[in-house]
Image (cartoon, rainbow, N blue to C red):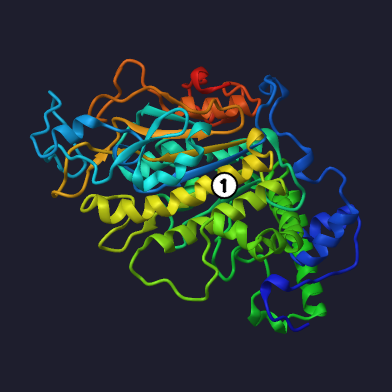
Amino acid sequence: MKNTSPWHRRRASAPVNRREFLWRSGGGLGGVALASMFGRDGLLAATANSVASSALIYPPRAKRVVQFFMAGAASHVDMWDYKPLLEKQHGQKWDPGESVELFQDGLGSTFASPWKFRPYGQSGKMLSEIVAPIGSVVDEIAFIHNLVGKTGVHSQATLLQATGFNTPGFPGMGCWVSYGLGSLNENLPTFVVMPDLRGYPSNGAKNWDSAFLSGQHQGTVVRVGSENPIEDLFPPRSAEFITSASEQAGLDVLERLNEQHATERPGDARLEARIRSYELAARMQLAAPEALDLSKESPTMLKLYGIDQSTKKWPAEINVPEETDIMGRKCLTARRLLERGVRFIQIWSGNDNSFPRRNWDSHEDIARDHGPLSLGMAKPVAALIMDLKQRGLLDDTIVLWTTEFGRMPCAQSGKGRDHNPFVFTNWLCGGGIKGGVSHGPSDEWGYKPANRNTPTQVYDIHATILRLLGIEHTQLTVRHNGIDRRLTDVHGESIKEIVT
């Protein structure tokens, strides 16, 4: 059958019994989709909690999580963490009274933010003008200003925030949530990842890989804004040569190979995970195109998210409307997926590695990089929070904003900032989070925590999110290589001060 668009292809075959369905799940996704409609007898992750019931000990305040990740290290002192002393001492020698080890030896003079700060909301939270749109929802947000990292190396610091470890080989946070709670829906992934179309972050897919968890828990990449948002979900246009007979022959071969594989490897869960992935892919052929179709949204809603519906192509040079449109499409798609039962969504920003830099890693020029990226991020993120709230979804959806580390209070090359793993900012809202608060101040420069004995670590944020999802983080474990592994390693305490 001739098809004009991969997002509108539909294929079908006759229903089959349970055994035949399992063995044939390696191909013929249209047939799998139909078979699954007739055979929902415990196959779906939606009905199966993988975690021991002993970990689910709290009344859940939240069901879903959205994680925003600003890749490259967004500057807290230029966005959320107002430091009057930087303005007062701008251009003077910066001297914290101790030796400072920096990533690129960018120890210049004290550097005030190029942007003005002013108070927003009833809480009076000081925000930079480049994140001014967040001011409309600032009373929903809990800011954590004393977060510390372990390294100033992008790859390691990114893994730490994404997986709880600064080395590869560990599941992403969304994988752990999928493992612990299962799915809220039958037809879409539990964990969705929206990368920046201009490039992957440090470590690439390792940030959302399931590692030693079953493969069904890994993040499914959705490239919002591309012609083919989910790769390999539909046959390519070049596959018109496939006939019913050739497809059946391929299914027969896969059946024999799968049966042989399972016979030789009793107890190996990888085949079952592969079968489940094919089942899900089949159902997604029907559900995903509708969920990702932003044309269903009103012009008012598109405008709220900053989505430009014109047909023009954005120029190569970075600009605020382009960035707003890019993030707006991700945020609106995220809301549509949350409504349809996707449990964990991870949205990445700023992975253009061309030079001059067009990402958050602003060594050379903080104003050139952070200005468009911040304004382009802030409007859609604020819109998502407002939209979730008016739909009643914010009450049980946690929104987390993070980055791998912050940036220094001193100048690098006159206009940029070097890496600062010693303190930076995360914020959360919704799903049991207390709004309008700032927890754990940084020092007068934004260089280190004000109280260096009681910093916040990523383990604490992960533990807090799991607690609000109803999970005791110390009990969400998997035995791997003789160790009971968990998202929070051997650390972490729930941050009681930011929970209602």
- Above-or-below relation of 98 to 282: above
Residue at left 67%, top 35%? 63
Element type where label 1 sits in the image = helix
Residue depicted at x 49% and y 18%:
497
The image shows residue 226 at horizontal and vertical percentages of 54, 67
Pick whichever, 493 or 438, lies toward us: 438
Say which amino acid is labelled 1.
Leu
Instruction: Say which residue appears at 91% left-offset and 56% top-offset.
Output: 17
Report the side of 122 relative to 119 (left or right).
right
Rendering coords of residue 84 (x, y %): 23, 31
Q: Quadrant of the C terminus?
A: top right
Dot 1 corresponds to which residue?
A: 384
Q: Which image quadrant for residue 426?
A: top left
* Pick the front one: 107 or 89: 89
Q: In this view, does 333 lie above or below 143?
A: below
- 395 lies left or right of 440: right
In this rendering, position of residue 31 left or right of residue 100: right
Residue at (70%, 26%) from the top-left corner? Answer: 52
